[in-house]
Image (spheres, grey):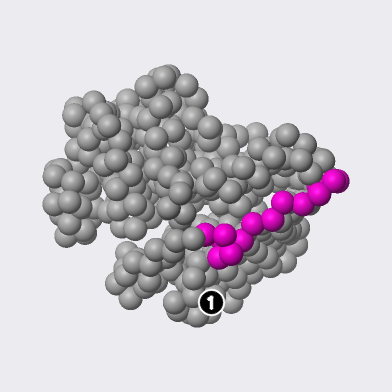
Amino acid sequence: MLRVGIIGAGVMGRTHAECWSRLEDVKIQVVCDVQVERAEALSRTYNCDVSTSADDVIKRSDIDIVDICTPTPFHSEIAVSALEKGKHTLCEKPVARNLESARKVVKTAREVDVKFMTAHVVRFFPEYVTARNLIDQGAIGIPRMARTKRGGQYPLGRWNDWFSDVDMSGGCLVDTGIHDFDYLRWIFGDVERVYASALTWRRLEHKDYGLVTLRFKSKAMAQVEIIWAQPPGTPFNTGFELIGTDGLIAYNSQDSSSLRIMVSNGDNIVQRAESPLTESPYLTEIRHFVSCIEENKEPSVTPEDAYKALEVAIASLESARINRPVSVGGDI
């Protein structure tokens, strides 16, 4: 039996908890949140303990896995502490808010004998996985270009409205764009240069938008559109076009998803799209992490993958700020 401590009981904490509860030989042992009422609500659902201290959760001898679902600025410190205490650690993306903190996580993860994975869940969405597999099989020839889109309305109703603070969230470029940065790296390899334009530095209340051009070392190119500016109630939408020398693979979540789930979160409506014919990608992701622990294998998202996705996101934010291209790459 693997026993889990979930740190952070917001939207992602609740999403992860529901997934953990579906796995055999896994028990949610404790839920932690500084807003105790949120932790208590989850504890009633999953019959587990309540805490308001991440340190207390990490120190517990009855915890095998720490699942970090806090706001971004707290990810790296909690991850390093959990790893040093010998806990298998799953951490929501991004791995950290800055590269220095991310390097500490990578270094620690490589020094300890436990599993670590950053939850880049797009790698577990069946449409995205299938597209990559088709590319690996040569279905569209050599991949050369891509265009991705991700976003909807600004994410309201979160703790202290932390998404509005760029120093905490990194705006849409870091928080949301990192999904596609990681996915595109998975297909095209390392990024060489980034050029971005964004509303991030315009100080528009509860709106952000970014358009990023990536040049890969393979000479492929991609355009990434990230949106936090659509009207309230607008469905969250993702999509891609992956173009090779012999063809194209395209996907749009609003055209392809047969089930949309909309949940109230204070003043905000949180929406996610799923197909009833497939397992939730969040469950697939967590099931994969558990299998890595049980079979002693490397998670599919390595610490270096998490770092390099963040490196692209940080470069995009800087490029948008200075209105110039930014080079990417270097030692971790």
Q: Position of residue 256 (x, y in %)?
A: 57, 60
Residue in the image at 50% along x and 80% along y: 231
- Characterize the local packing of mark 1: few (<14), some (14-19) or many (20 or more) Cα atoms within 10 angstroms: some
Q: Toward the viewer: 292 or 275?
A: 275
Q: Position of residue 124 (x, y in %)?
A: 51, 43
Left or right of 245? Residue 79 is left
Q: Toward the viewer: 107 or 238?
A: 238
Q: Indicate yes or no whether the magenta region holds residue 255.
A: yes
Q: In the rendered structure, which segment of residues is drawn in magenta?
A: 244-257
Seen in the picture, residue 288 relative to 185 is either above or below; the reply is above
Q: Which residue is mark 1?
A: 230
Seen in the picture, residue 204 relative to 5 is either above or below; the reply is below
Q: Indicate yes or no whether the magenta region holds residue 101.
A: no
Q: Amino acid at mark 1?
A: Gln
Left or right of 253? Residue 11 is left
Q: Quadrant of the C terminus?
A: top right
Do we see residue 10 in this rendering?
Answer: yes
Left or right of 174? Residue 140 is right
Q: Position of residue 331 (x, y in %)?
A: 65, 34
Q: Toward the viewer: 189 or 326?
A: 189
Residue in the image at 52% along x and 70% along y: 152
Residue in the image at 49% along x and 71% along y: 235
Residue lying farthest to the front in this orientation? 277
